[in-house]
Amino acid sequence: MDKNNQNNPEIIKIKDFVKDDRLDDAVKIIALYLGDSNQDNYLNRLENIFEMLLSLHGGRMVLRFLIEQLIIDIPSLLEHLSKRDSVLRYSFLLLLKTLCENECDLFLPHSEDLLDSPDPNVREADLQLIIFMAGGEIDIEDESLVNKIVLTLADEKDFVVEKAIQALITIGRRHPSLITKAVTNFVKEQPENEKMKTAVDTVLKSVVTVEKIDELVEESHKEAILDERSLEKEKIERIDKELDLKKKEIEIKIKKLELKEKEKDLEEKIIQEREKTLKLNEVTLEQETTVSSDLEILPKKVIKQLKKEETEIIDKELELKKKEIEIKKKKLELEEKEKDLEEKIIQEREKTLKLKEEILEQETTVGSDLEILPKKVQKQLKKEESHIIDKEIELKKKEIEIKKKKLELEFKEREIEELAIQEKEKALKIKEELIEKETELSNVEIELHQKKIEEKEQRILESELERAEEKIKKLKEEDSHNSDENS
């Protein structure tokens, strides 16, 4: 600021207001001071204000108020600056450096729109402000803004391209992966643009240094860890299912034991009933040598019913055994697939270990070709290692699918076992019913035998009575005949 401006009463008044912490009054006077300017002296007055305020305690706060209240409009300021030569333009922008570094939020909202300006000087000035902001306290990690800066690598003006390269390099010091991703995607979209390729190479050489390779490796490993975590969740779910299956197995075993006990009790009952029937048969054989036709019909019906029910049970048991054999075959096939997958995983891991050894060897032998090395390492990391990690994840997913299928088969086995138990229970019930029927039949047989015996006894009695009556008649006749002869 020259002596004439220092002695300007308005400048002196502004200084006094700022020193007295009358910031609002200072803002009002500055607004009037700039409002009285014309196109010729606007930038000079603005430059004087910036120089004066930056030298005063509390002046930066006044500048913030001026920009927030749009007394100083950043887009119009850059348009005014575009009319100056590059040296004067840059010297003015340097006044904004500390403000950009510490008050980034005042300039960042305008950055993306200003890159679309038709004036190349405005685009260059905007990129310079972005460079100042990226070198400050706040991190710039806005993907939209970064992609917009990357697009300016294809700008018609070389000085704009140079500023874009500087801006990307400055942001890339803190966020190399963000810049690398944006730049590589841009190259894929325009593979034939040689000028743009050279600009991208310059950015990558500066951003992807040997020190940043570890960061890229860590990020790739983080992604792998996330996948592993999801796999671990699936493993936990699988373990829970296995526990449920084991619980069901225990329940099934308990049921089997209960059924065996019931079977034993039933067998004992059957033996007792058969002994009773044998005894009854012996008694009936002693009493009678021939059984009536009614008694012969009843056992035949029972035998037919028994045969039908037994054949049905045998058929069901055969079906269940066939299903069990099929499930065992599927299990064996799944186990073979699991072994193949494990072998593939081991092979892929061996490949990754070899790659890592090669990368470590390359890192130890860094020499004059330091600029070429990051490209090779980056390509290996991105193409080979990521490809191998993807394969590992796919193999793990297949392994989980196979285990899921195994679990499903085990569930089916349990269901089949439960069905078998149910069928056995049905068979036991049928046996119990048959035993009851046998006992009923034996009781019927006994009753019939008793009736037959009673009938025979009655016949015998009747025949004896008839004989007795005949004898009595004969005796009477003889007596009457004798009495007649005597008379």
Image: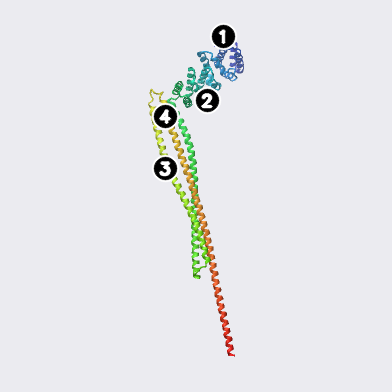
Count residues near mark 3 (Cα–Cα under 10 Å), then give few for <14, some for 14-19, many for 20+. Answer: few
Q: Earlier in the sequence, mark 3 or mark 2?
A: 2
Residue occupied by mark 3:
336
Which mark is in front, 3 or 2?
Answer: 3
Residue type at mark 2: give it. Ser
Label 2: which secondary element: helix
Residue type at mark 4: give it. Gln
Q: Residue at x 45, y 49 (%)?
A: 325
Which mark is in front, 1 or 4?
Answer: 4
Residue occupied by mark 2:
144
Residue 265 is situated, as x and y percent measured from the top left of the image, at 50, 58
Residue occupied by mark 1:
4
Can residue 265 be seen in the rendering of this structure? no
Which mark is in front, 3 or 4?
Answer: 3
Label 3: which secondary element: helix
The front one of 460 and 52 is 460
Are the residues tagged 3 and 1 within 8 Å (C-beta)? no
Which mark is in front, 3 or 1?
Answer: 3
Extreme-bottom residue of the structure? 487
Residue 60 is situated, as x and y percent measured from the top left of the image, at 56, 18
